[in-house]
Image (spheres, rainbow, N blue to C red):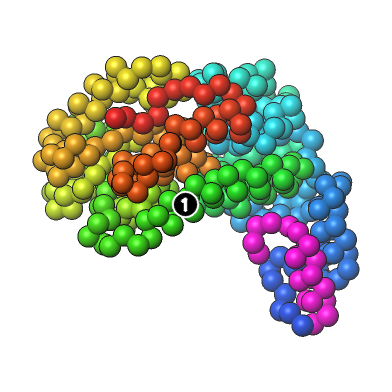
Amino acid sequence: MDEQIDDADKDLLEEIIAGSKVPTNLSDANQDGKIDSSDIDLVDRLLNHELANITIIDSANRTVSLEIPVESFAGLHTSPCREFMMLGIDDRVVGVTNYVFDDPDLYPRLLDKTNIGTIYEPNYEAIATAKPDVLIMTPGSYIEPVLSMVEPMGIKVLGLNLNKADYDSELMLLGYISGKPDRAWAFLDWKKETLDMIAERTKDLDDDKRLRVFSATMSSILKGDKELSPSLIGQHQIIDKAGAFNVADEIPTGSKVDGEWILEQDPDSIIVASYFVKEGFGYTVLNDTIAWESLRTVVESDILNQTRAAREGKIYILGYYGTASGGQDPIGAAYLAKRFYPDLFQDLDPSQLQKEYFEEWLSIPNRGLWAYP
């Protein structure tokens, strides 16, 4: 139950079979109704990256049996497409979401794949033509109609977010079924190293020294909305991972807060999440001209300009898709920790982490504007 398949699992299975340990809910590895030596044999095949039939539970809580390693994949949202590149299995990808073609520089090795639409409007004819062994999509309400159309084609469907709190376990699952568990585990080690370092340096901060932070969405502020939804940067705990208090931690996902609530909280810092290149952030943005205009609009907005954060110049913007999406949380946390606690992180260079992520993990050039100022 530690998200990694290794010899410890074999040892545990032997103890369960011998009756000295209580079975876990995944002890019946091959799902044949009993826990015996055949489950240990399956673990051996997984450790040796051999062909095997496994049964997994996806993030939609569906039980799916697969022959692994899977030979061909498709992704109906951008998160699995990004991880296909990171794991180095883009040569096995046959179909990608339409959103990939909206940001071609970020997905250069996927541009020759079949466009299969989006989770909102799947192109079933294109999916049938591409005919992946496994189609990955989000686990929410959009999965049911896709199942009814795609499973009769002989295509397995997995619900994986690859973008939320369960990212680590989902990435390991994708690593195992693609035959790339070592690559997935290495990335999680890289990710953990920075997050552990930040946690270690901030763990002894007194509560009165720990910044109180609110995070909002740039597009909502630019529209002049009087009520704001806490952004995904807050919901994905990037603020907490940077050693600060997220004042909106108790606000339900999708809910909005009004100006009076924000002024009552009077946060020490405000983080604004930008999702669009037109706001001045993204992989193709090469200067800060638009970012400066966006920041000025935020600082001068009716509500936020009355906060402590605005008065003290502690409003910052992060480009979401390079700092907080999927496994990028150490990058976002590093940018924030450097700004929140400069004395604790004089030696931390978030831009170097960004460079490593693009060049060493996605194997694309390091580009873009992701944090301002």
* Residue 19 seen anywhere in this rendered image of the structure: yes
Q: Residues within 10 Å of mark 1 (few under 14, many from 20)?
A: few
User: Is 5 within the magenta?
Assistant: yes
Q: How many marks do you count on the picture?
A: 1
In depth, the one of 291 and 193 nearer the eye is 193
Residue position marked by numbered label 1 in the rendering: 197
Nearer to us in this view, 77 or 154: 77
In the image, residue 178 lies at what x, y percent? 74, 41
Q: Is residue 132 visible?
A: no
Q: Give the x, y percent position of residue 136.
A: 64, 39
Residue in the picture at 31% in, 43% down: 342
Q: Which residues are magenta?
A: 1-19
Q: Tell me the quarter of the picture where residue 296 sits.
A: top left
Q: Residue at x 55, y 33 (%)?
A: 356
Residue at x-position 73% and y-position 57%:
5
Q: Is residue 151 above or below residue 17?
A: above
